[in-house]
Image: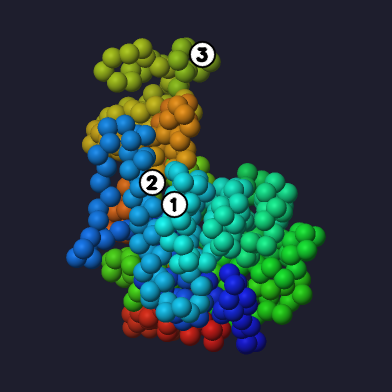
Amino acid sequence: MKALKSLVMSGREVLPVVEGGKGISVSNGESSGAWAAAGGIGTFSGVNADSYDAQGRIIPQIYHGKTRKDRHLELMSYAIQGGITQAQRAHDISGGKGRIHMNVLWEMGGAEHILQGILDGARGLIHGVTCGAGMPYRVAEIAAKFGVSYYPIVSSARAFRALWLRAYNKYREGLGGVVYEDPWLAGGHNGLSNSEDPKKPEDPMPRVIALRAQMNEYGLQNTPIVMAGGVWWISDWEHWLDNPEIGPIAFQFGTRPLLTQESPIPEAWKKKLLTLKNGDVFLNKFSPTGFYSSAVNNKFLQDLKDRSERQVAYAHEKVGAHTESFQVGVIGNPVYLTPADIARANAWKAQGYTQALRTPDSTLVFVTPDDAHQIKTDQANCMGCLSACAFSNWSQNEKGTTGHMPDPRSFCIQKTLQNISHGGDVDNSLMFSGHNAYRFAQDPFYADGFIPTVKQLVERIATGY
């Protein structure tokens, strides 16, 4: 394989290998500091990161506010303190080698406030900010304010063009690179557009060439592209190296760093990764963000899938084929279903799915009484972790609401991600993963359940494998 050439990123020459900045407590100061110490770019998650007490124990993020807005303020406070804590840990572990980046989601609740709070409290410890999950127009301005590089995450040349023309052209010097994230193969939330078919993945090379051509129009020939999503062995991408149509290229690894000794995920999660088969990662649209996301198809996702299948459309009055009266709740006016749907509804009720919950799309989903209680409890306990949440109808606008009915077909993403990252049941929690996770079971590097250190993994990646 061609030798990997170092690149200057965020002000220093580094190996062109980047740790993906996975969500809540999945990429932290320990993992990112070790990655930087190995000569690459370590990335910790700035999404509700953990803080620790004097004994080094994780401080539980418990909310006491009576209103969603009060709890939202608590969440931002936790997030800022946690981000500063992880930045300090990463800096200390890195020993001044490599670079430390922080990843934030633009659609997380209070993103701008949290980003500025962490950068202010961790001055000199963070060298770059990666940001996706939305259109982060203001990340360039914020990064410039604190003298750090910024790395937008995009899934198309068109998206970068919009960001450049609206904002980034004013902050050219701070653009450290552009992360192209494959919307079909990356783990977590993906940037599939409405014009793209989730069942028909596209070759990333033409899309990245188009991105490079767009960047070249703006004089960004020397600005690296970071390929993210679907990257396992760099040998698979050898034809990208020294390719003038691609230009300077680095590779981001999100899934492989999950299985390292420094990875903070629970042991049960690590063991599960070693058992996955091709197709076990499921591209779905259950997230309350409204984005597609990729996660392991476990009982948690299957329950959501089954819930959506127990769904019928209703009308508020008799119209067309909707002729059969159906009572929702103990009191209230009935709704009307078709004869076929009333039969399905009665069959589900006979199976124990006796609670019919309304959705924003004038449908009913049928769940058990216990599930109905849990859904309503989770919605009531919302702490505003997203800028807008379909599940709870929270929005960080002045009204505190999206104006739409809460959607029981979704879930509280903060709750399940906190659960799984802190030892929760891997079968009954959302487990984000890239689609290549099945390769853990096939890659000889992990034979007999071997779990490398970050240093061993980076050294292995540098060989091409």
Label 1, label 3: how many angstroms apart (C-alpha)? 54 Å
Residue 447 visible in this rendered orientation of the protein: yes
Q: Which mark is residue 319?
A: 3
- Which is more toward the observer, 390 or 381? 381
Decide if residue 141 is on the left or right side of residue 407.
Answer: right
Pinpoint residue 84: horizontal percent, then vertical percent. 39, 60
Q: Quadrant of residue 153?
A: bottom right
- Which is more toward the observer, 266 or 430? 266
Pinpoint residue 349: horizontal percent, then vertical percent. 29, 30
Q: Residue at x 66, y 46 (%)?
A: 195
Residue occupied by mark 1: 117
Q: Is residue 311 above or below residue 433?
A: above
Q: Residues within 10 Å of mark 3 (few under 14, many from 20)?
A: few
Q: Which mark is residue 76?
A: 2
Q: Earlier in the sequence, mark 2 or mark 3?
A: 2
Amino acid found under the numbered disc labelled 3 = Val
Amino acid found under the numbered disc labelled 2 = Met
